[in-house]
Amino acid sequence: MNNFQPRSGYTLPVFACAAALAALRCLHNSIIEKSQDLDPIDVVLVDLIAPTITAEVPIEQVALLRPGMALAVTRSDPGDNLDLTRNTPIWAMVELMRESGEEEIVILGGYGIGYHKTGGDAAIYSYARQLLEENIRRSQRPGEKITVTIILPEGRQLATRTSNEAFGVVEGLSLLGTTGISQPLSSPDQLAVFRSELQSKVDRFDCLVFCIGENGLDLARKLGINPDMLVKTANWLGPMLVEAGVQNFQSILLFGYHGKLMKLAGGIFHTHHHLADGRREILTAFCARMGVPAAICNEIWESATAEDALKQLRALDENMGSNWVSLVYGAIASQIDQRASDYIFTHSERRLTVGSLLFSRDRQIILKSEIGDTILSQIC
């Protein structure tokens, strides 16, 4: 029997924080010892905050660049995840200044950290900033102003293999996440973690919001949804829906990227693309059913991605004054609601109300089903 247990690791913000702490320690040591010949820094401790544990992170290199500025390097280790950042170097350059009237800790995105096309802010999200600020503050000395610049030398190259640009982040990767632990999301152990999280909410809520990934979680919070109502499902939508039925929740709002959620309309309840796809077929079928012209249906069929297909429907609406996006996605969302509710009943003999909200890669809401709109208005 194979007793292999997938190994968890840490998310990218943890390694960025570890490198920053190592660089800061190097600077403090140089001030005390007044020498560039410093003792090596092989490991640092990082308080993950979420969860409340301390991680021991190896440091690959540390260098004093000049008085008041140091650079440290570590490498990403996400555990047994199919993560493209595995073993990528993370640099943190830390500079000490003694200036009054400015922020005590400034966090910047350097080369390889993406930025938002709208506004130009570095794609360093709230958890990463909190992690850096709280850990650095504990080592900060009175009167110090600390500027941290995070650099991902391979970030731009790796970003071409992600959907970051479609989500409005360009020229690099994001420091994204809500936790310091990187769990193997495709493993049964991770499903057990998700179920446990759902079960912990039974006594507090009648309704939950299912988010497949971090983009959904982030957007849901921005809409004002109580974070405690959010449950991450990754691609385990089917088992998580059934668990919600077993635990006697009354309603579920499916909150996700349209390219994932539309799979449910075709009866696909494990949404990992390695197991099943069908997005092209599902979207083309709904276009044909709603009366989209045959030539456009053929273009939808030939689309490389669900996002490209959505753009074609939007262009058609803009040029023709039609309403195909609303009609097609309205039908898809309604079918998602019905099939999800039926799936729960089939496997748990309990009937839950299920609504859906679909958003695009730019995090704009495409459509809320009628039930989804009702649930959202009740919880916001």
Image (cartoon, rainbow, N blue to C red):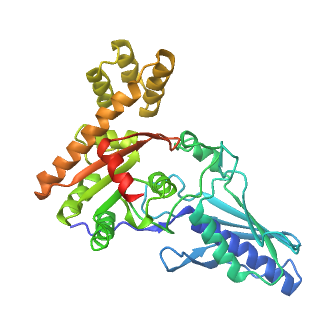
The answer to whether residue 268 is above or below residue 90 is: above
Q: In the picture, which quadrant includes the N terminus?
A: bottom left
Asked if residue 184 can be seen in this view, the reply is yes
Q: Is residue 334 left or right of residue 75?
A: left
Q: Is residue 284 left or right of residue 176?
A: left
Which quadrant of the figure has residue 39? bottom right
Q: Is residue 115 left or right of residue 363?
A: right
Which quadrant of the figure has residue 133? bottom right
Residue 328 horizontal/vertical position (percent)? 34, 29
The answer to whether residue 193 is above or below residue 38 is: above
Residue at 38% of width from left, 30% of height from top?
Answer: 326
Residue 10 horizontal/vertical position (percent)? 51, 67
Q: Is residue 153 left or right of residue 77?
A: right
The answer to whether residue 261 is above or below residue 347 is: above
Residue at 33% of width from left, 13% of height from top?
Answer: 294
The answer to whether residue 125 is above or below residue 46 is: above
Pick the residue in front: 112 or 341: 341
Residue at 70% of width from left, 78% of height from top?
Answer: 137
Residue 345 horizontal/vertical position (percent)? 13, 53
Q: In the picture, which quadrant includes the C terminus?
A: bottom left
Residue 243 horizontal/vertical position (percent)? 22, 62
Pick the residue in front: 4 or 10: 10
Asked if residue 235 can be seen in this view, the reply is no
Which residue is situated farthest in the bottom direction here?
32
Residue at 30% of width from left, 35% of height from top?
Answer: 332
